[in-house]
Amino acid sequence: MRTNPKAIPSDQGAVSANRIDEHDVGTRLMTARARCAGTIVFTTSFGLEDQVLTHWIASAGLAREIVFATLDTGRLFPEVHDLWALTEDRYGISIRGYAPEAADIERLVLQQGINGFRISPETRRRCCAVRKLVPLERALRGAAGWITGLRADQSQARADTSFLQQDTERGLLKISPLYDWSREQALDFARRLEVPLNPLHARGFVSIGCAPCTRAIAPGEPERAGRWWWEQDAAKECGLHVGSDGRLVRAAASAAAP
Ligand code: SF4
């Protein structure tokens, strides 16, 4: 953990967060902490929801108890790296980047070309596997809990997202404290609390992934329409939250949300 005199003191942040009481995400995080005996990893992609969660984790005084991780795919927007640095500075945290294996990338590019993900859904999934899934497995190795910024209303594929879900394939508790938030709520929260956001959001990039696979969306388009827009598959998932059967991991744990 880096020490940063400009970071928000946790008690000051907690006061702000409590006053706002947005479905009490602080209590949810505390509940998740109590339910997990081991390490909890928060994987951030620096999108709106993840930035809001970073703020809540710091505000709840949990920044030293939760491991911050990100998947540095090698194809991210420069704005994402800038926000990564800004977020570490603002909250006084260190976010560990997990990069793909160099040999895997070299083989992938040799086999299907540098932008081979556009050839077919299969080549796209292969790229996501090398650049995201393999690093994710390393990021979650040994973890008992996994915090994500998933919201149920992001897409049909995510509609069954709930606060606590058992990820049976990875053997950990999947924690989605913003599962019942809307995008508008998250935006409003971020603006009021001056949470640092990716400037691409203001240019119509709603869900932000790798640069060549993300475009801005028009008003009224589904949130994830800008991801792999050339594909017809409405699911628009890269595999991070999908089981081996191709469905989202969604076996809910018994605890109800506070
Ligand atoms: Fe590859 Fe695109 Fe998936 Fe990034 S989002 S890993 S560039 S296919």
Image (cartoon, rainbow, N blue to C red):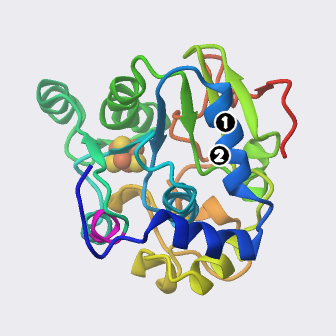
Local SS, label 2: helix
Observer able to see residue 176: no
**Label 2 is placed on what type of residue?**
Leu
**Label 1 is placed on what type of residue?**
Ala
Residue at 74% in and 75% down: 20
Locate residue 253 relative to residue 183 in the image: left or right.
right
Task: Name the residue that disc number 1 marks.
Answer: 32
Residue at 81% in and 55% down: 180
Residue at 43% in and 61% down: 46
Locate residue 26 relative to residue 87 in the image: left or right.
right
Binning the other alpha carbons within 10 Å of mark 1 as few (below 14), some (14 to 19) or many (20 upward) gives many
Task: Name the residue that disc number 2 marks.
Answer: 29
Q: Percent x, y for residue 45? A: 43, 54
In this picture, which residue range is highlighted in magenta? Answer: 86-90
Q: Percent x, y for residue 33? A: 61, 35
- Dominant SS of magenta comes to helix
The answer to which quarter of the image holds residue 136 is top left
Binning the other alpha carbons within 10 Å of mark 2 as few (below 14), some (14 to 19) or many (20 upward) gives many
Asked if labels 2 and 1 touch by Cβ distance under 8 angstroms, the answer is yes
Observer able to see residue 195: yes
Residue nearest the observer in this picture, 37 or 42: 37
The answer to which quarter of the image holds residue 184 is bottom right
Q: Distance from label 1 to label 2 (Cα)? A: 5 Å
